[in-house]
Every structure is written in C-alpha cells, then in structure tokens.
Amino acid sequence: MAQPDAPPDVTTDNAETRPPVVVKKYANRRLYNTESSSYVTLEDLADMVRKGRDFTVSDAKSGEDITRSVLTQIIVEEESKGQNLLPIPFLRQLIGLYGDSLQAVVPRYLEATMGTFARQQEQMRRATQEAMGQAMGGFNAFAPFEEMGKQNLAMLERAMSLFSPFPRPPAGNGRPAPAEDVEAMREEITMLRNELAALRRNGAEGGSR
C-alpha cells in the first residue's frame, strides 16, 4: 500500500476558511485523514461535518472522488442508530425519482430548501433559552418554530409530489387533462418559489438581529 500523504500546512483555525481536508480511502476500506496523518472512522467524519469542517474523500488507488458515497454511508450509519431524520414516504419518493426526467431538478431544490433551513437554525437556537423559560409558564413558546417546520415540510412534500414519476389521476371523465395538469404544476412551482423567497428573507432578517 502506498505511503499516506503528509498533512498540508494549515495556517488558520477557522474551519470555514480552511481548505477541505483530503481523506483517502484504501483497499482495506480504511479512511486516512491526510491533515492529521491518522486513520479515521465514519463517526469521525460525521463529527467534522457537525463542526463545519469540509472534507473530500478520494479512492487512494484511482483518485476517484467518492465523497458523495461516503456521505451517504454516514447517513445510513446515523439512521441505523435510531437518528431517523428521513421519513419513509420521502425516501420512497426520492428513490422513485432516480432515472426520471426531472431528476436533475431535485438536487437544486433540495439544496435550496436545506440552505434556507440552515439559515433558520441559528435564529431558532438563539430563541431556545427564552422559549424554555416561557414554556415553563405554560405558554408554548415553540409554536412559531413548530409552524415554521410544518411550512417547510409541507412545501417539500408539495415539491416532491410535483416531481413524482407516477402519473396523476385522470380527470372526472376518465380522460387525462394535460393542459390543466401543466397549468396546475406551473402554479405550484410559482407558489413554491414565492415561499422559498419568503423563507430566505425571514432567515436573513433573523440572522441580522
């Protein structure tokens, strides 16, 4: 087996500005962190993600970028531990989209949706202490966040139904109505765009406070 690479010269402690850590995966399935010159596990990589430390994973022999598959393995590991974040209906819809003509649209939409949610997270964290205090008095201080989560989930479910590879039910006369379907889809997409824009504005306003 080839000798692991030496760790790069790192001059800053800021995880967001430092270059991505290069991780190599060897034939024995072991993962080697070239920055720390040590072998790591999927749990170690998951911890790096939580800390905002970016990394890439490549096959040590071929040099192929396998970051996506390793991140997917991390998700599978977390789900197997009972950290269930992915609802079964969502997983079914997602699987059904592979190979569909709209497959290229889904990643961009999911990325935008999760980006908006990530911006809202900080706003939610800042309000947690105050919310806990008010909740002790019998007032549901988490109601705004619950409603925000419901709105995000409803928006995602509507988007996934639009992208569904299964045909919509026919019109009342038993015949499909393609023109009405296209118009309804356009209206739904417009609504989703407006909701995404509103969520981005709310996230930006919350972050500036």
Image (cartoon, grey):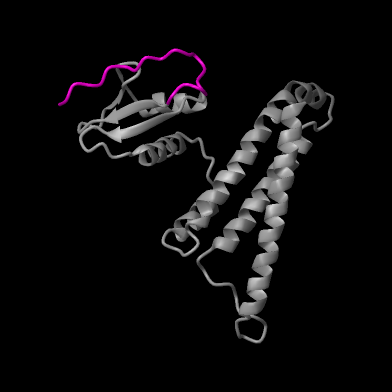
Q: Magenta residues, as a range?
A: 1-19
Q: Residue 4: say if magenta.
A: yes
Q: Residue 143: say if magenta.
A: no
Residue at x 61%, y 78% (from the top left corner):
178
Q: Quadrant of the C terminus?
A: top right
183, above or below 55, in the image: below
Image position, residue 198 (x, y; %)? 74, 45
**44 or 132, nearer to the observer:** 44
Residue 207, quarter of the rendered image:
top right
44, above or below 165, in the image: above
Q: Is residue 131 visible?
A: yes
Q: Number of labelled discs?
A: 0
132, above or below 93, in the image: above
Q: Main secondary structure of the magenta part?
A: loop
Q: Is residue 76 left or right of residue 89?
A: left
Residue at x 46%, y 38% (from the top left corner):
79
**65 or 88, nearer to the observer:** 65
Q: Quadrant of the N terminus?
A: top left
Image position, residue 3 (x, y; %)? 18, 21
